[in-house]
């Protein structure tokens, strides 16, 4: 069941990135990721954020659970680092930081690491 979750989370991430890029229009997903950030008025920044989300979404579609685990670690560490720069809304980003660390542990557990 966890493997299916990673796959569905990958699809979700790809959709979120495409919505940020305005390739798709799903109103609920439009601000979900961007609402974690303090500043989202820079279109280039938003596009690069979307590309990053799509990239780790694509990786999560694979069966490489070590790599999937690392995407969750990177996601968590990026948000923690951006918190240090006061660039995230902590109430919104904390859930993602915490859940990403748990999902990283679970994905890496599947590989025997």
Image (cartoon, helix red, strand yellow):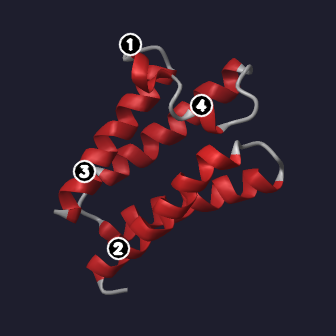
Q: Earlier in the sequence, mark 4 or mark 3?
A: 3
Residue 21 drawn above or below residue 78: above
Residue hosting label 1: 25
Question: Image point 37% across, 35% down: which residue?
Answer: 14
Q: Nearer the viewer, mark 3 or mark 2?
A: 2
Cα distance in 3D space between marks 4 and 3: 22 Å
Q: The C terminus lies in which quarter of the figure?
A: bottom left
Q: Earlier in the sequence, mark 2 or mark 1?
A: 1
Question: Image point 42% across, 26% down: which residue?
Answer: 29
Residue hosting label 3: 7
Label 3 Cα neighbours within 10 Å, binned few <14 / some 14-19 / many ≥20: some
Cα distance in 3D space between marks 1 and 3: 21 Å
Q: Earlier in the sequence, mark 1 or mark 3?
A: 3
Question: Image point 38% across, 44% down: which residue?
Answer: 57
Q: In the rendering, at what x and y percent does residue 42 appear?
A: 74, 21
Q: Earlier in the sequence, mark 2 or mark 4?
A: 4
Residue hosting label 4: 34
Q: Earlier in the sequence, mark 3 or mark 2?
A: 3
Image position of 112 (left or right of 87): left
Question: Image point 74% across, 57% down: which residue?
Answer: 81
């Amino acid at each position: 069941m966890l493997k299916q979750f990673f796959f569905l989370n990958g699809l979700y991430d790809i959709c979120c990135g495409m919505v940020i890029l305005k390739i798709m229009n799903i109103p609920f997903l439009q601000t979900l990721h961007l609402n974690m950030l303090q500043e989202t008025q820079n279109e280039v920044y938003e596009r690069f954020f979307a590309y990053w989300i799509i990239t780790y979404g694509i990786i999560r579609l694979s069966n490489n659970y070590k790599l999937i685990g690392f995407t969750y670690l990177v996601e968590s560490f990026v948000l923690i680092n951006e918190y240090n720069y006061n660039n995230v809304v902590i109430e919104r980003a904390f859930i993602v930081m915490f859940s990403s660390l748990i999902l990283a542990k679970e994905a890496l557990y599947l590989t025997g690491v």
